Image: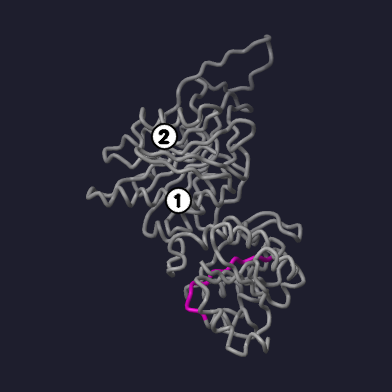
């Protein structure tokens, strides 16, 4: 792909050298176009070093414009990504202004355009900015983000630019350059479970696990960007709800089982990304258990298997399992694939601090007669790749002449 990366004057511009690296790792040629304000946050030298191209920033460059170079550049691009996109540049794009090279290119290109907003959360929620966002979306410009979290100003809220991995995966993903950005699940409803469960022991104690929910939440965001309606059944996590996703909060494995079965009839795709407890206490004390002897025994009973129960629905689903293992990863994963008669299994190693709580992961995916490895990458980027793979396997199953089936994915992060 040939990608024009427009950089405007926001503090998130410091992330753009990494964004260029991620785009090039995915095979893209990147031409950077900077606004004057962007120079206050990132240097031309750094950007030229990572892109391997001279930086363009001046509509009035006589040498470049002798042959109407901005028109040639607009036609060269397979896609235009503006990251970060400030409130100012969003307003100029909405008005159709062409006062500099970047905004002129946006008007002159026939290729897909995406922007990654980045600004203070109060600015992002300002009615004028939201009106501009809605207008740009109506005109076919893809709005990527923003994310929620801590900001450079010290405040917290929606307005952070998406991470470079996620932006690169989206822009270079299937369909984007054809004017159908991230639409592999358009028209589908995706139900995802995420995070841990808590199994109560008494009013103040519970049993849980190390799942952060990051993989499930990343999958929800990736599915949303792939065009799906997304319902997320979430255990207790310390993550902001993804914008545009329907979130249903639960606590225990039983809560998650009931909520999943309440919603699953609406789903085309079910992704069980939660790390659901396999066992729960037989009984829960109604008062705090006081410390007494040197040992205490708690009798446990199996919880309902959410994945198995969905896979056993009358219409057999396209079923993908997940193997979180500490050793003999491939052996155990393939055994689980065959023993449970799954259509696909995603395997990752959780030994030595890997996967759980981390922002990155590496997985091996297997299905009967095939497989694919995904090297270590940010969970946001990995989620986009997994959604693409799930979609392609779903479409392959639908293309066999059988009726489309439910997709079931079990991923513990």
Q: Residue furthest left?
A: 401
Q: Is residue 267 visible?
A: no
x 58%, y 57%: residue: 25
Does the magenta segment cover residue 114? yes
Residue identifier under label 1: 387
| Mark 1 and mark 2 residues within 8 Å of each other at the beta carbon | no
**Residue 217 versus residue 124 in the image, above or below:** above
CA neighbours of label 1 inside 10 A, class few (<14), some (14 to 19), many (20+): many
What residue is shown at x 69% (from left), y 15% (from top)?
A: 291
Q: Quadrant of residue 202?
A: top right
Picture quadrant where residue 196 is located: top right
Q: Residue furthest top?
A: 293
- Look at 43% across and 44% down and name the residue there: 271
Front residue of 156/83: it is 83
Looking at the rendering, the stretch of residues picked out in magenta corresponds to: 109-119
Q: Position of residue 117 (x, y in %)?
A: 61, 66
Under circle 1, the secondary element is helix
Q: Considering the numbered disc 2 on the image, is that residue within a helix, a strand or a loop?
A: helix
Q: Is residue 43 visible?
A: yes
Residue 253 spot, x, y in % from top left: 48, 32
The answer to whether residue 52 is left or right of residue 260 is right
- Which quadrant would the C terminus be assigned to in this image? top right
Q: Which residue is mark 2?
A: 306
> 365 or 317: nearer the eye?
365
């Amino acid at each position: 792909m040939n990608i024009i990366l427009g950089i405007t004057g926001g503090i998130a511009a410091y992330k753009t050298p990494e964004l260029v690296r991620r785009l090039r790792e995915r095979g893209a040629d990147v031409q950077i176009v900077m606004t004057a304000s962007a120079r206050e946050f990132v240097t031309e030298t750094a950007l030229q070093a990572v892109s391997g191209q001279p930086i363009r920033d001046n509509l009035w460059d006589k040498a470049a414009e002798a042959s109407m170079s901005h028109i040639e550049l607009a036609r060269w691009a397979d896609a235009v990504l503006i990251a970060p996109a400030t409130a100012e540049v969003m307003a100029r794009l909405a008005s159709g202004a062409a006062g500099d090279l970047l905004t002129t290119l946006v008007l002159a290109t026939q290729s897909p355009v995406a922007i990654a907003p980045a600004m203070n959360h109060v600015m992002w929620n300002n009615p004028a900015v939201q009106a501009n966002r809605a207008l740009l979306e109506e005109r076919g410009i893809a709005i990527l983000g923003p994310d929620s979290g801590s900001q450079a100003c010290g405040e917290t809220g929606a307005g952070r630019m998406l991470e470079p991995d996620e932006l690169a995966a989206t822009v270079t993903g299937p369909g984007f350059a054809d004017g159908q950005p991230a639409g592999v699940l358009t028209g589908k409803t995706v139900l995802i479970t995420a995070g841990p469960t808590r199994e109560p022991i008494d009013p103040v104690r519970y049993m849980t696990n190390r799942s952060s929910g990051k993989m499930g939440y990343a999958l929800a965001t990736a599915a949303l960007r792939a065009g799906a309606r997304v319902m997320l059944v979430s255990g207790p996590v310390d993550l902001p709800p993804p914008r545009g996703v329907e979130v249903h909060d639960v606590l225990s494995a039983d809560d998650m089982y009931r909520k999943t079965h309440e919603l699953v009839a609406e789903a085309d795709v079910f992704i069980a990304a939660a790390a659901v407890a396999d066992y729960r206490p037989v009984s829960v004390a109604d008062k705090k258990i006081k410390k007494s002897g040197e040992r205490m025994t708690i009798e446990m009973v199996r919880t309902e298997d959410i994945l198995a129960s969905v896979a056993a629905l009358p219409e057999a689903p396209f079923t993908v399992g997940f193997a979180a293992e500490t050793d003999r990863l491939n052996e155990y994963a393939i055994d689980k694939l065959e023993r449970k008669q799954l259509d696909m299994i995603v395997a990752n190693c959780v030994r030595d601090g890997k996967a759980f709580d981390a922002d990155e992961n590496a997985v091996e995916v297997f299905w009967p007669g095939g497989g694919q490895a995904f090297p270590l990458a940010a969970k946001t980027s990995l989620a986009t790749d997994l959604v693409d793979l799930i979609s392609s396997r779903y479409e392959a199953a639908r293309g066999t002449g059988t009726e489309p089936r439910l997709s079931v994915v079990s991923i513990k992060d």
